[in-house]
Image: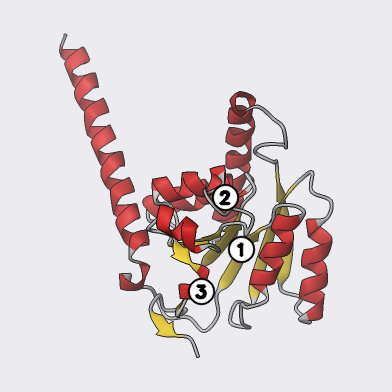
Amino acid sequence: MFFLFFFVTAVILFGVLCLTAFMAFQVRHSNHSAKNMPKKDTASLCVVLGSGGHTSEMMELVKHFGEEFDERTYIIADTDTMSEDKAINHEKSRNNEKFCIEKIPRSREVGQSYLTSIGSTINATAFAVKLIYRIRPDLIVLNGPGTCIPVALAAAFFDIIRLIDTVIIYEESICRVKKLSLSGAILYYLGMVDCLIVHWPGLKKSYPRATYIQDLEHKFTLDGSEKKSQ
């Protein structure tokens, strides 16, 4: 009887601890500009590429990141045969040699049932945890495909246990006019991103915590504060 009481109490306390840590994570990432981060001259950028139109949208966004993001890692699904070439061509156009391509298993293939995708997502998350721990990015930029969920989960895990502090930005696909994609909805409702960007005012109205792309009057600096765009 005593053992049962001790076990139940331990489980409850552990649950409360985990919930408190996750809520603290959400607070930090809902107001990132208030966090005290060490000032840096350069930062590492991690970009998760999907396939097809998702990659094109992400590469268009990456073009706006300056030279201060000198170390860049591109994460693609191991079945994606197109995104790697686009990332390499972009970095060659910048004469940048400080980049690498990393591959992880795809969490969900096109047409795969949600039930069977649970196992593949767990597998992809395990790979993502090892990868994020190794590269320790300062900023992660995500876009629509399911590949981004394992990476976001891995980054959130290390942030919750205060091992790595990473800014997470998610850009929803321009094709999403009325509602978020499954990936976007997961990240939005779990509060796992510092900024979720949408392209349509109607979508912003449906998801108030999202950021309408034309309202981006500020941009993050490397010390975690915000400054007016020029």
- Amino acid type at circle 2 is Val
Residue drawn where x is 55% and y is 80% of the image: 42
State the CA–CA distance, disc 1 to disc 3.
Answer: 24 Å
Instruction: Indicate left or right for 14 with 122 as reference.
Output: left
State the CA–CA distance, disc 2 to disc 3.
Answer: 27 Å
Instruction: Indicate left or right for 138 with 192 as reference.
Output: right
In the image, 93 versus 131, the foreground residue is 93
Q: Which residue matches tag 3?
A: 214
Work out whether 32 lies above or below 206: below
Point out the frontmost of discs 2 and 3. Answer: 3
Work out whether 15 lies above or below 116: below
Which label number is shown at residue 224?
Answer: none
Mark 2 or mark 3, which has the lower sequence index? 2
User: Total label count?
Assistant: 3
Mark 1 or mark 3, which has the lower sequence index? 1
Q: Secondary structure at mark 3?
A: helix
Evaluate if marks 1 and 2 touch, with contact meaning CB atoms under 8 Å apart: yes
Counting other residues with Cα less than 10 Å from the Cα at mark 3, is it few (<14), some (14-19), or many (20 or more)?
Answer: few
Horizontal and vertical percent position of residue 207: 41, 54
Residue drawn where x is 30% and y is 71% of the image: 34
Q: Secondary structure at mark 1?
A: strand
Which label number is shown at residue 46?
Answer: 1
In the image, 220 versus 181, the foreground residue is 181
Q: Which residue matches tag 2?
A: 151
Residue drawn where x is 49% and y is 46% of the image: 185
In the image, 53 versus 101, the foreground residue is 53
- Amino acid type at circle 3 is Gln
